[in-house]
Amino acid sequence: MTEDIKKIMAEIGFNAKAACAKLSTASDDEKNDALHLMADRIDRNKEYILSENKKDIQIAKSNSLSAAMIDRLSINDLGIKNIASSMRDIAKLNDPVGRELESWDRPNGLHIKKISIPIGVIGIIYESRPNVTADAASLCLKSGNTSILRSGSDSYFSSYAIYESIKEGLNQTSLDSNAIQLVPSKDRDAVGLMLGGLDSSIDIIVPRGGKSLVSRVQSEAKVPVFGHLEGICHVYVNEKADITKAIDVTSNAKMRRTSICGAAETLLIDKAIYKEYLPKILSKLSSLGCEIRGSTEIKDVFPQTENVSDTDWATEYLDAIISVKVVKDIDEAISHIKRYGTGHTEAIISEDEKIAKYFFNQVNSSIVLCNASTQFADGGEFGFGAEIGISTGKMHARGPIGLEQLTTFKYTVYGNGQTRP
């Protein structure tokens, strides 16, 4: 590790901590004005951002990155528009800071309030999605948190171009310009320094990327982590399912975007209906370019099926491939999900409300849906404006990490001279 990167990261940590004081008490108007100015700069610098994105894509192709990775990396005119629009949408959301979450009176006359406050400094380590730069920066700013962004080398030029636009907008405000910082280096040692907390400057780490990145973060981080290791998501077609919904939801859950963590990887279907339902569901998937993997009984009703192996059930494809299994009943479906699922997102297709409720009660993933695509596992779709990531942990925040999840709380206690005996 060079002394240069140590010095750079130490300064970034110090500046982020110092910027917290002003940002944590900034008014909603101040934060919203900043978000609008940042969004305006994104729009204004569209051509520059797109040209920098082309650099990343060319490098990715020369390095033979997969089509799924290039899809995650790519930005177009609509993508720029959506980035700016998302920032403006975040500005419309209620300020999550300073809310009175609860209040109560004690017999001794003390009046206690539970008040939401920012977490502090949030480190975001991400790989191939340049839009994370804007989403993470915006959510952190709106929730009163300073952010340290570390983009992946694959998306470095795109991310830095977006960051430069954000910085231009931020510099026009009364807020500390160090409220948002991006690590100006591809040096991998920067990640290790962030995981160490930068001398207690970082309060939370959020990883956004593949299994190897998240695994490293979870194993090495000396500060709390919001994140998920894998997204092995399931769609379970119950015997009480509507066939049209089963076809539409399954095909969307798998094929809308195969490269996102909310894409379905496994289809489970009840034995009582598979001979009737599977040919229709799998025909639709196949027509969209999806490879089907299953056992002999699946091949009997859909001959184009490829052989499935035990490793398939534990594989996050992030590609146009789906594993299919016939289950005896809902309990076997739940057992399969508990064995191979990663706690991300699962869906049941059923018209029986009691069965759906049973599925909801038994499956403990962070998101569970009925008659809806797993691709709704997204903070924007939940009405959060955007998300900084999805967490499958069970402490503090779970599911999409939006504004409210980026706050913690403190207690304020009002007395009138009380002393404790």
Image (spheres, rainbow, N blue to C red):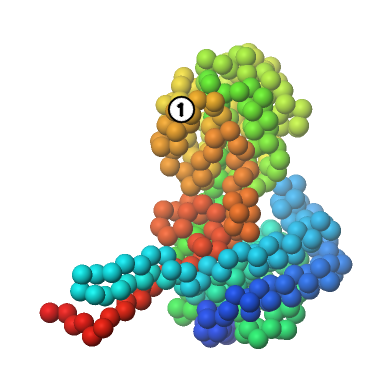
Q: Residue at x 58, y 33 (%)?
A: 371
Question: Does residue 412 appear to the left or right of 122 in the view shown?
Answer: left
Q: Nearer the viewer, residue 98 or 234?
A: 98
Q: Is residue 288 visible?
A: yes
Residue type at tag 1: Ile
Question: Does residue 192 appear to the left or right of 173 in the view shown?
Answer: left
Q: Residue 225 location, x and y as percent?
A: 47, 62
Q: Residue at x 55, y 54 (%)?
A: 400
Where residue 275 sits, quadrant-wise, is top right
Q: Residue 69 location, x and y as percent?
A: 71, 51
If the image is split into quadrants, where does the N terminus sit?
A: bottom right
On screen, residue 344 above or below 145: above
Q: Nearer the viewer, residue 81 or 299?
A: 81
Q: Residue at x 59, y 27 (%)?
A: 324
Number of disc labels: 1
On screen, residue 311 above or below 73: above
If the image is split into quadrants, where does the C terminus sit?
A: bottom left
Which residue reaches farthest left?
421
Q: Residue 269 location, x and y as percent?
A: 55, 24
**Pointer 1: what residue?**
355
Where residue 77 sits, quadrant-wise, is bottom right
